[in-house]
Image (cartoon, rainbow, N blue to C red):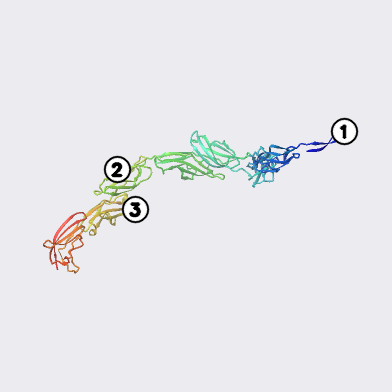
Amino acid sequence: MSKQYIVCGWVGSFFSCLFALISVAQRPCFEADVRRGCVPLTIKITECTNGGINLLYKYGDGNNLPTPSTTHTYNNPGVYSITQIGSFNGQGDSLRKVNYIEVLPTPAPHFEVFTCADRQVFLNVIDKQYESYQIDWGDGVKQTIARNAPPVNHIYNTTDNYTITVKGVYIPGGCGAENARIVTPINSLPSPQILRITTQTKDESVGAISLSFQALQGFDYEVRYRKSGVASFQTFSILKNVEGTQTVVIPNLDTQKEFYCLQIDIVDKCNNRLSSEEFCTINLNVEARDSENLLSWNRYLINSHFQSYLISRNGQVCEIVNDWNTTSWIDRDVLCKQQYCYAVVVQTQSLLNQARITSNTECVQVFSTLQAPAVSQLNATIQSEKSVALFWKSEPLPRILRYTIVRNERDTLIIQGNDNQALDNDIDTHKQPFCYQVSYENECGNRSELASKTCTAFLQIALNTATEAFLQWSPYQNFNDQFEGYFVQKFDAQNNLLAEVWNGNFNFWVDDALQNSPQIIRYRVKVKIRENVFSYSNFVQLEQKNRLFVPNAFSPNNDGVNDTFEPQGLHIHKFTMKIYNRIGEKLYETQDIRKGWSGQINGTDAPQGTYIYVIEFEDFLGNQQQQRGTFLLLR
């Protein structure tokens, strides 16, 4: 491409001008209207190629295809290169500007705000992304600070809520993002709140005390302590920018002999300071004495704070003492060989603070030389023909090592363990009553007295006739003879219960129903000790004799009276009856005692006269008998 220019200059002593045609070469050339800005960033390209044609652009953000568009938007932060491609003077050429465009991220600026006394607010920009930060304090006051500027503060006129807005700004670029936070100025510092003070370790040189307190965001806290009797406090530690419940342990103290008072100072960013009330420790001593533990502690130093002493045993409160001057307590609800751990907690209350002061924890093991109490509710019952079962009640602690059982004041049984029942085997319960006493040895090494005697009821048949039996038994005996009365139980040979009769406190009974009873009768006494608790005597067995009555005459006249020859019997198990005439001919036979002879022979009336019977029978005891005789048939 050629352009026309006027060229002027001196030629010798003359100044002259002339027209000239000068050729200007084409070349790749472009400029962006914006080279630095916040995402999303839109740029516009202006070309300066002096007539280049077919111009295309690559914007370097992931799309590798050239585009003729001279407007482009970057949606991700980063540094990008732009390439121009085209035809210049009939030849292809390109220009690449490396790291030409800077697209900046826009995170919300990070800053912290602390309140100070006298409505001062302390602001510190932690964020380092932007070159400049614009602060709007929310009360009409605004200011701008540079990156890495020191913290700034502002004084408000009221304690209302204000919204502080901080905007980060890029330079150059002029863009950015903002963040906001609500702040409430304070007139004065809040009083520090001590929650707990605990003597963790009791020792003359390596004792330790822990202090827990509630920290508020935006303040520093200084933990201080002094020995009782010393006026000034010394600082143990300073906790900066903490929040929530904090616990500090102060080691290497003489917590064996000394008491300590602790205090916390709250400090704001403007170096204003406020001290908490002081609270003091207490020390606990525990002495194990015979069957009791003696606790003693120092009186809490500050009476105005005191509400009560809470005495805990194994982590549970067992006593509350409301008297400030009471500094001892005896725990008698203890068991030997058991370990008990105690602590005393002082409940405090003031206008500004409520705290719990916990002493050191002291553990002791109980010993005892006291005689152990006797077992109670000792009872005995016959369990089988060869055994008596015993049961009683005893305290679960101290643990029982072994029981000693004395039978009939002469025989001794040793039962290892702490089960409150036993079985006396290999005895004959039919010969005599059995009486028992029980004592034990516990893990304290102490023995109990022998418990009051218990005796089973011993049952005997004193007298019996064909129609009745007289039963008598030795009285049941237990602790203080506490029982309600007797039942008499009646069984058959297969131990099926036939009857149970309440007999009150009488130890004898008459059974007058033998005729309606089986041949073998078993009796037992059931002692009602209390509701659903019983003791049983031995069994006694009554075996009745069999009986057979055979009539000596009958008259089969069909008048309903004595029409058949029919024997009657009791306790007959097997029966056979045969009837003969006088010449020995068998006329009738039956195996059913209830079926007698009707006086007929093959359907024809037998003649009047004398006949012979032969009866064989067996009772329920297996006794076999035969009876012969004659009888008269009358017409």
Residue extending furthest top?
12
Q: Residue at x 78, y 36 (%)?
A: 24
- Nearer the camera: disc 1 or disc 3: 1
- Residue 89 in the image, given as x and y percentages of width and height: 75, 37
Query: Does the rendering let one see residue 124?
Result: yes
Task: Give yes or no for contact between labels 2 and 1 (Cβ–Cβ under 8 Å).
Answer: no
Circle 2 packing at 10 Å, graded few (<14), some (14-19), many (20+), is: few
* The label number, if any, that marks residue 15 in the structure image: 1
Closer to the N terminus: mark 3 or mark 2? 2
Under circle 1, the secondary element is strand
Query: Does the rendering let one see residue 258?
Result: no
- Residue 10 in the image, given as x and y percentages of width and height: 86, 32
Circle 1 packing at 10 Å, graded few (<14), some (14-19), many (20+), is: few
| Nearest the eye: 390 or 7 | 7
Closer to the N terminus: mark 2 or mark 1? 1
* The label number, if any, that marks residue 532 in the structure image: 3
Image quadrant in which you'd find residue 124: top right
Q: CA distance from mark 1 to mark 3?
A: 148 Å
Q: Is residue 2 left or right of residue 320?
A: right
Under circle 3, the secondary element is loop
Q: Is residue 590 left or right of residue 269?
A: left
Q: CA distance from mark 2 to mark 1?
A: 153 Å
User: Amino acid type of disc 3?
Assistant: Asn
Q: CA distance from mark 3 to mark 2?
A: 28 Å
* The label number, if any, that marks residue 413 in the structure image: 2
User: Amino acid type of disc 2?
Assistant: Leu
Q: Quadrant of the C terminus?
A: bottom left
